[in-house]
Image (cartoon, helix red, strand yellow):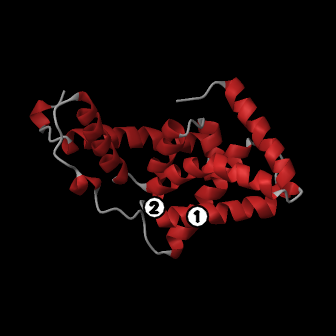
């Protein structure tokens, strides 16, 4: 879901002000920016790695780069796009260094028996979605996470993942097609029962 433009401008203005102070080595501004982005980055990176400890390492690496290169930010994108791009590239580098893809034992193994009330059904569907997302290629999972969970536009995602906008749209399309096929399987719906 896309955030309203005035909210994006307000957040970017706040982030730019913090970045200006970070350029002058203001540790308080750095700490504030870290707390603004930590949960967003943690959510994004744990979807890539499935390991919180690895995600934390990537977050720390990302913010070291932000601290070190704040003076190099040229305002060619929003600060959030710049930071997410750094995190994405650090995440890919860390995964290559670990010589592994996404680490996942399969969320379905962890599913509990749920009651029939609405919150339980929602939790079950969320688990199916997590399991289906884990089965997508990393590039497709990343664009969905950036778009639907973090609210980035296709243009911002293209900057973050360093590819053309049409590639982002193609990845989204194929991810949706795969999810449409995977979700009924995870829900235990047979081919004959599917609409």
Residue that badge 1 annotates: 58
Q: Which residue is the extreme one toward the right?
A: 24
Quadrant occupied by the C terminus:
top left
Q: Which numbered circle lies on residue 70?
A: none
Q: Which numbered circle lies on residue 49?
A: 2
Mark 1, other Cα within 10 Å: few <14 / some 14–19 / many ≥20: many
Q: Nearer the viewer, residue 172 or 21?
A: 21
Residue 170 appears left or right of 166 = left
Q: Is residue 161 above or below residue 1?
A: below
Tag 1 and tag 2, C-beta contact below 8 Å: yes
Q: Residue at x 66, y 61 (%)?
A: 62
- Residue 169 point in image, percent of width and height: 52, 38
Q: Residue at x 59, y 38 (%)?
A: 152
Mark 2, other Cα within 10 Å: few <14 / some 14–19 / many ≥20: many
Residue 12 visible within the image: yes
Residue 68 appears left or right of 99 = right
Q: Is residue 161 above or below residue 13?
A: below
- Residue 129 point in image, percent of width and height: 32, 42
Quadrant in the picture for residue 61: bottom right
């Amino acid at each position: 879901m896309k955030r309203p433009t005035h909210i994006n401008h307000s957040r970017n203005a706040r982030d730019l002000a913090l970045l200006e102070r970070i350029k002058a080595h203001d540790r308080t501004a750095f700490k504030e920016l870290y707390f603004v982005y930590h949960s967003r980055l943690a959510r994004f990176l744990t979807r890539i790695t499935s390991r919180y400890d690895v995600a934390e390492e990537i977050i720390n690496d990302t913010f070291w780069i932000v601290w070190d290169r704040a003076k190099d930010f040229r305002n060619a994108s929003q600060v959030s796009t710049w930071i997410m791009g750094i995190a994405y590239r650090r995440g890919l580098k860390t995964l290559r260094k670990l010589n592994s893809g996404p680490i996942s034992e399969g969320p379905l193994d962890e599913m509990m028996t749920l009651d029939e009330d609405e919150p339980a059904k929602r939790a079950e569907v969320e688990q199916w979605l997590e399991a289906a997302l884990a089965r997508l290629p990393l590039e497709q999972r990343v664009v969905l996470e950036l778009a639907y969970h973090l609210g980035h536009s296709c243009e911002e995602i293209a900057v973050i993942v360093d590819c053309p906008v049409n590639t982002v749209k193609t990845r989204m399309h194929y991810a949706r097609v795969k999810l449409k096929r995977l979700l009924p399987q995870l829900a235990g719906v047979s081919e004959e029962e599917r609409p």
